[in-house]
Every structure is written in C-alpha cells, then in structure tokens.
Amino acid sequence: MQQDSVWTQIRGKRNVVGYSKKLRKRIKDGEEVEEEVIRIYVSKKVDHSSLSLRDLIPEEINGVPTDVIEIGEMKALDALPRAHVARIRPLVAGVSVGNWAITAGTLGWFFEDSAGRVVLGSNAHVLADDPLTPSSEEKRIVQPGRVDQGRVPEDVVGTYLWHQPLEGSTCAVSNAVAGLLNGVSSLLGRKTRFELSLVEKARIDFGVAEPTVDYEIRLHTAEDCEGFVGLGFAGSDQASFFCKAKHIEEAGWSPVDKEIMSVTMDDQIHKVGRTTEYTTGRVVDDSAYGRVNYGGVSFVEFDDVILTTKMLEGGDSGSSGWTSISLTI
C-alpha cells in the first residue's frame, strides 16, 4: 500500500485524523468480516448528508476499499488531578514528573545510551518546556510535577538532557496564510483549496533527563513488568496512542534491564501512570498514522504508532506500556 498516496487523498478532509498503514478487516455491526480495507480514522463519524463533496472519504483508494472508524480527536494529554502524585524517594517509574515549565506527566521508565549512561525517560512534552523546539531552556525536572505541588529546589530530581523535536508542527502564520488563500479561492468560485503539508513525520514523543537523586529501577506499585512496548503520549475519550519501543531504541535509548517487544492486533498492553494508575488496553492498530493536537493550532503527524482502546487520561503522558505487569497490591 502506497502510504503517502493514501494520506494525500484524505488529509484535510473534515474530522480525518489518521489511517491504518496495513490492510485491515472491515468492521460491520461491531464485528470484523473477511474483506480487507484501509481503515480511515476520524475524530467523529457523521452522516454523508452532513458533509460537503470535498470532505467525503473515497470508497476506494488505489483500488482498495476504505472503512471509516471513529477514535475521537487525539491530543497530547495535559494533567488532570489524581493518583500517583506523591513525592516518591527513591525515585521510581510510573509517578508524577515534569519539566518545571509544564504541569505534569508520568515518568515512563529508565533508559540507557550506548555508553551505559542511565537516564529518566518520558515524553518530550513532559520533560521539555516546548517539544516542538530543538532543546529546552528550562532544565529542572521535578517530582512530583509542578501541578502536583512539586517545588524547587527541594523536589528537583533531574536535569533535562535531550528530546526528539516533534517535527511537522504548524504555526499560526502558516494556518493564517492557508486560510487566506482558501478564502480568496472561494470568493473567486474556484474549487482549488490549499492545505498545509508536513514534510517530516514524527515517530516518537520522547525525551530524557539526567537523574540527580537516588532511584530504583522499578515501576510504582508493581512487583515486576516485562516486555517494553513503548510510551503512551496522546489520546481521546475513545482511544490512545503509544510510540513504539523500537523507534525509541533507534534514537539511541534502550530500556534498562528490559526486553523490547512488538505487539500485534488485539494484543493486551498494561501501564501504570500518574493519573489513572494501572490500566490495560487492547491493540486496535499495530501500525497507525495519526495526527495529534499539541494545543491551539499546533499539530504533529506521527508515523507507525500503536493505536489502543482508551488507556490514558491527562497526566498519563509518558506512561510505559508493557506486555505484562505484576502488581504489588
């Protein structure tokens, strides 16, 4: 399946937020049938009569039938009140953490580079003051996060080290120019419309910090966890996104003492996070392409991420996903 060709034909259509990168079975009356399709993911599924002709999703793309699936609007998750927000020392994964400039997210796990340096790992939008830029001006990492009453200097647990910049964001100027051009085109009665094209596609929302306090390499409230799948980074009221462990490793960071595992359709993923603590979910798509709102008019397109049933709430950003977790409680 020609991936760029698929996205070119659906991006910009009303409510479209992504698609399946592999052929999937059609879902009919809540059950999968044998017909293979390209699943088109939308924030809200509406009747054809409510859509303009330019917003209708083609019944076929490149000769392959399509199937429209509602997953909600995927957003980077800001903090909500609750749960694993206490001050934890020695530091462990699965608890509230964050750059001093943001609210709070979740410390996902401990990672190491090729030289064996151990670091704290979470989302870029948790450990950096702005994940869309190449570096972070604010370096202080606090646990618990600022919104959870973390304070400086007493709650500083690390120093920002690095994050993968989230390429492909759009700015207000770009959107304004596109809007202006579309307005002129409409006034002239032309059918042409201008859409923003994101050249770079992200694969991970990931950053690291150097620990400055004692830590234990374990997951809060868990005896053990096995099979590192990746990090949760976005979600809606219906679904969640996880970036894949293999892409984090490709960026130069491996989970300490844990094996990386891949997942396939209908596999179960487990996580412990700052807000919703322990939850499980089912893999809906093991290779999805999706667009995530990072606030206002900024969005990022992600390539080859895991789509699950709803597992994350605000503040769970950065939670590590596992094939199994043994809880202590």
Image (cartoon, rainbow, N blue to C red):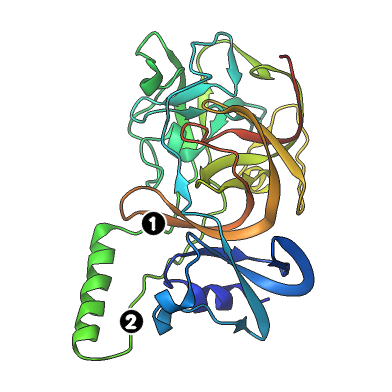
Q: Earlier in the sequence, mark 2 or mark 1?
A: 1
**Occupied quadrant, residue 172:** bottom left
Residue 295: x and y, percent? 35, 47
Q: Residue at x 57, y 46 (%)?
A: 240
Q: Residue at x 47, y 23 (%)?
A: 97
Q: Residue at x 70, y 68 (%)?
A: 28
Residue 38: x and y, percent? 65, 72
Residue 114 in view here: no
Residue 36: x and y, percent? 75, 74
Say which mark, if any, is on residue 53: none
Q: In the image, 313: left or right of 61?
A: left
Q: In the image, 289: left or right of 138?
A: right
At label 1, the amino acid type is Ser
The residue furthest right is 34
Query: As displayed, is residue 311 above or below residue 218?
Result: below
Query: As displayed, is residue 92 above or below residue 47?
Result: above
User: Label 2: which residue?
Assistant: 193
At label 2, the amino acid type is Arg
Q: In the image, 145: left or right of 297?
A: right
Quadrant position of the N terminus in the picture = bottom right
Residue 136 in view here: yes
Between 65 and 212, the one nearer to me in the picture: 65
Q: Residue at x 77, y 75 (%)?
A: 35
Q: Residues within 10 Å of mark 2 (few under 14, many from 20)?
A: some
**Occupied quadrant, residue 193:** bottom left
Mark 2 or mark 1: which is in front? 2
Say which mark, if any, is on residue 169: 1
